[in-house]
Structure formats: structure tokens, C-alpha cells
Image (cartoon, rainbow, N blue to C red):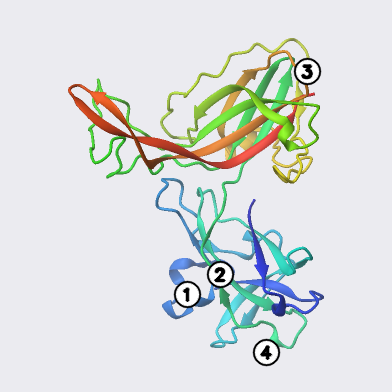
Amino acid sequence: GNGLRVYVDRPWFSSGDGELLGVVILGDGSKFSAIPDAMKPFVTQWGLDPVFDSLLSKEQTRVADFPLRVAAETVALEENASPVTVVGHRVQWDGERGLWYCDIELDPGRNYMPFVRLALVRYQPHSRPDAKVSRVVLAEFAQLLPRRAVALQRAGNAVTLTLRGPAPEMGSMKFPPESQYLNISFIPGPFGPPSETGRNRLEVVLQTRDETIDSDLAWSDAAVLTSTLLDPPGGDSPPPVAPVAPARPPAGGMTVIRPAAVSAGLSHVLANAGVVAEAGLAELFDPALWKGTVTLPSLARPARLAIREFERFYSDRTVPERRGNQTLLRRVVEERLVYAEYFALN
């Protein structure tokens, strides 16, 4: 699921014993369109990022959208006594930062990078009915990183990858007045450059380890096995940036590769995180975003696969380019990492 870590000023909680961080929603199943203007500063809302063309987020909040909850009930706000639903989450103490924190997982739907604004209270479920929640604190807007689930199967030197999760059909480079050239908008023609989609780029990279170095710096990229633009299910298939190397699996069974345990300097990865079973129901309810096969070279050193996804956008930098008898300024495309996972190979 998607999640946020919320840090809370120390005076808000005394010991954390019996005290929860509450997420305030208008009601279980209440639609955002039903929130009165007077209540908007006191309840949680979310919505899509207009930069990306993707599926709409859920139009309502439910208690079930918060899987890490430990309590939920209807309470009256201290500000105006209006009934709302509070969804309680346990808090933890961060001794290094000297702050309480809470991990909140939520399900806003299959939208890509939605904005979320949490309405938060200190919640004491065993207190008097008129003293269970504090006054509401409205958090800043935050964006949820895309949910990703990846499955790998290996047969000899052939590795088949399946990636699932929401992705944008179009990104910021697709929409006017953006152009690949500064201050110029060309209409793509049959002989002109292809129009930019702004879709995310996925790459599968072989990394090797220098055994003389005892840190994450020992890993370095050895080869890019594939690089392609992601095509959400139901969209128009874009041409790959680099073709996937075909491979014929040898006879024998397939081996499922699980994510490697990576030190905190790179990623917090659990032993089974991000692995989904290949089944008919998965294709029905969570269709594959990308599936392909890569071929591994001979592995003489410790190696792993790095799967990385990048958003792509036009930067403010330009480079000169000749088009006919004109010299135009082409925008430089930059990338932002939004997902990374690592799988040990030997």
C-alpha cells in the first residue's frame, strides 16, 4: 500500500501509552463532494495530481482505506461539536530525533502520485466521550509514491520480470504549452519527430559488487539490460527506449527471486516485500504494467538486479540543435527516481 510517516511535536504525547494519532474523515464512506465548506479545514482529503493523466483517485474515504488502524469510531470535534470519524494509529518514539512518529498507510485508489492532506488529532479511545480527541491539526499537502509490486522468475540466465501498479498514461511533457523546443510548439507530422508522451521510464540494470569494499558503495552498474517507457494497461504501446533482450529459458523449473536485503543507506526492503503471485486474479484486479525477459551474462562476481523507475520532465537547460536552416534550442530532459528495488542473483 501507499504510506506516509508523520512526525509529531513531543508535547502532543506524554508516554504513547493508550494515546493514538487519529486521522479525521467526515464519515465512513462519505464522499469528498459531500464535505461542507465549513468542515474542509477539519477532515482528510485527497485528489489527483493534474500534471499526470492517470486513473481518478477514490471519491470517498472509508475506515477500511487505512489498513494500519487499531481503532475507529465516531466522535465530536472540539472545534464545533460536529460528528466525524476518527481512525486511530499507534505512535512510536524516535529517540534519535526526539520525536513521536506514526506510520499511516492508506489506499486512495489506483491513481498515480495523488496529493493527500491529512487532518490529525491526538486520540484517546478510552477517555470520556467529550474528551477523546484534541483540536484538529491540518497537515501540509503530501504526495504518495506509486505502489509497486514486482515478481521475478529465473531459469538459467533468463530472468522474467512482471511489474504491477499505477502509472501515468501521459506526463508533464505531453501537455501544451510544453514543447521539446524552447518557445516553439511543433505539430508532429508523418516526417517529424514523434510526440512526447511523458511516460515514466523503467530500467533493469545488472550491478556487481567490489568485495574489497564493505559498504553500499561497493555496488556499481555493470550493464543496462533493458530500458523502456511504461505503458499502462489499456494505453497505446510506446516504442521501447532500448529493446528487451530475447531469451529462451532452458528446460527445468523456474526459480522465484525475492528482493535482496539492502542496508539502510539504499533502501528498507523486507524479505518478501513487493512480490506478488502470478495468478489469474492478479491479472484481473491488478494487470501487469510491464513484463519482459532479460538475459544475464556470466556472473563471476557477486551480482544483483536493480529495477529503477524514473519520471521524465523538461528542465530549464537547453542545447542548440539545427533544424533545416534554423538553430533551435532543444530542452534537456531530466529524470527523477520514484521507485527502486534490488534482487540478489548469487
Question: Which element carries disc 4, helix, strand or loop?
Answer: helix
Label 2, on which residue?
Answer: 139
Sequence-wise, the earlier of marks 3 and 4 is 4
Inter-mark Cα distance, 3 to 4: 62 Å
- The residue depicted at 60 percent of the width and 46 percent of the height is 147
Residue 173 numbered tag? none
Relative image position of residue 325 (x, y in whole percent): 17, 23
- The residue depicted at 47 percent of the width and 24 percent of the height is 241
Sequence-wise, the earlier of marks 4 and 1 is 1
Sequence-wise, the earlier of marks 2 and 1 is 1
Label 4, on which residue?
Answer: 130
Q: Is residue 196 above or below residue 89?
A: above
- The three-letter code of the residue at mark 4 reads Asp
Inter-mark Cα distance, 3 to 2: 51 Å
- The three-letter code of the residue at mark 2 reads Ala
- The residue depicted at 78 percent of the width and 31 percent of the height is 213
Tell which tag, 1 or 3, sits nearer the viewer. 1
Q: Quadrant of residue 204?
A: top right
Sequence-wise, the earlier of marks 2 and 4 is 4
Classify residue 179 as left or right of residue 252.
left
Question: Which element carries disc 3, helix, strand or loop?
Answer: loop
Sequence-wise, the earlier of marks 3 and 2 is 2
Q: Nearer the viewer, residue 243 or 76?
A: 243
Relative image position of residue 292 (x, y in whole percent): 59, 23
- The three-letter code of the residue at mark 3 reads Gly
Badge 3: how crowded within 10 Å, few (<14), some, or many (20+)? few
Question: Which element carries disc 1, helix, strand or loop?
Answer: helix
Q: Nearer the viewer, residue 298 or 77?
A: 298
Label 3, on which residue?
Answer: 253
Q: Is residue 338 above or below residue 64?
A: above
Label 1, on which residue?
Answer: 40
